[in-house]
Amino acid sequence: MFKVLEGGVSEPIKWSKDHLNPESNIIILDEGSSSVFLWYGAKQGLVSRRTALRQAESLKGHGFSVGKSIVGRDIKELIEIDQRKIGRVPEVDDLHDNLQTLLSRGFKYLDDYTVTFDVDGDFPSAIKPTSKPVSTKAPKPTPVAMSVDKPEPVVIKTQPAKEKMKHASEYDTEPDLPKKTIPISSQKIADTPMSTIEQVTAPEPKLDLSIQAKIGFVLIGVLDHYNDIWISKKEDGSYSVEHMDGKVCQFSNSEGKIKFSSDSFTGISTNIKTEIQKKFLEMSKLL
């Protein structure tokens, strides 16, 4: 368990649910569920919340050294819990219940800050301590003898068996061997499975100007009420807008229309929500 301090520093703290209070941002690494929980205290502003998120993402990617072991190397999921949404957003309530269940389990200390849960008198999983140092380098593969059927002889000529296979390099200086030219009309193109063809990801298409304008209308409506906002684009293509005290709204483009998520505007007053929506509708008439 970590407490995120000012300046982007995460400080290990004693295991206790009492740390989950409005004044703190708390990070919890749980190898049992391969998750890292990030608790946002209700009184934490946008800057401190963003700092905590960066720290949680760093711990998720690299883990934390505890003696000769590294805790959190296999973390796969980052779970954010905003205290202000507890009791108002069902999805957040479910995540909070899972975290409380974790914090309510019986435990014992492995060191000053690392705990483990007893499961039938044994360590549960990856946080079992080891006597050997943990290396961050990938282990060297060990050759394994395999029995395979003798392949049918092939017509393709290969290098002599005594020669070692060389890897392609842009710095190779040996001249290419002469190749026999075959007329295009006589060449036969073999069928190649689609799965073996290297696919090139096409660049994301640009949004129509009308959609870009509608996105701008939403932001203008928000800026009428908040001077400092944070705008981020999510992996699913949606946009999230936050102000210093929390989230304003989240919306996406659906067939040329702006669609707001179910928890949009839940953290602000109803009057401001109405005025933002009214401004958006008024400006949309200009298109």
Image (tube, rainbow, N blue to C red):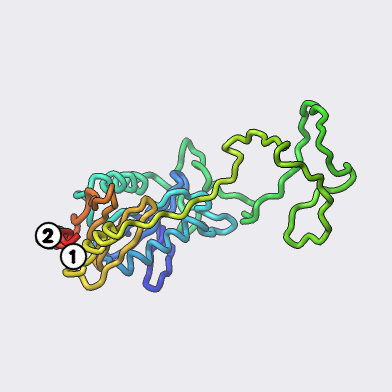
Would you say 140 lies left or right of 44 here? right
Name the one closer to the observer, 147 or 94: 147
- Residue 219, how many percent across, how many down? 24, 64
How many numbered discs, if any? 2
Between discs 1 and 2, the one toward the N terminus: 1
User: Is residue 165 shown to the viewer in this render?
Assistant: yes
- Residue 1 lies in what quarter of the image? bottom left
**Which residue is rendered at x = 38% and y = 67% of the image?**
51
**Which residue is rendered at x = 44% and y = 44% of the image?**
33
- Residue 47, how many percent across, how many down? 32, 69
Q: Mark 2 packing: few (<14 Cα in 10 Å), some, or many (20+)?
A: few
User: Is residue 43 shown to the viewer in this render?
Assistant: no
The three-letter code of the residue at mark 1 reads: Gly
The three-letter code of the residue at mark 2 reads: Lys
**Which residue is rendered at x = 63% and y = 33% of the image?**
191
For mark 2, give the secondary structure: helix
For mark 1, give the secondary structure: helix
Residue beneath disc 1 = 221
Residue beneath disc 2 = 278
- Residue 58, how many percent across, how many down? 47, 61
Residues at marks 1 and 2 touching, judged by CB atoms closer than 8 Å? yes
Name the one closer to the observer, 105 or 194: 194
Q: Mark 1 packing: few (<14 Cα in 10 Å), some, or many (20+)?
A: many
Name the one closer to the observer, 229 or 190: 190
- Residue 82 lies in what quarter of the image? bottom left
Name the one closer to the observer, 235 or 197: 197
- Residue 136 lies in what quarter of the image? bottom right
Would you say 112 lies left or right of 69 here? left
- Residue 173, how many percent across, how many down? 81, 61
Calculate the distance from the C-alpha at mark 1 to the C-alpha at mark 2. Answer: 8 Å
Farthest residue, direction left? 271
Query: Against 54, is 199 above or below?
Result: above
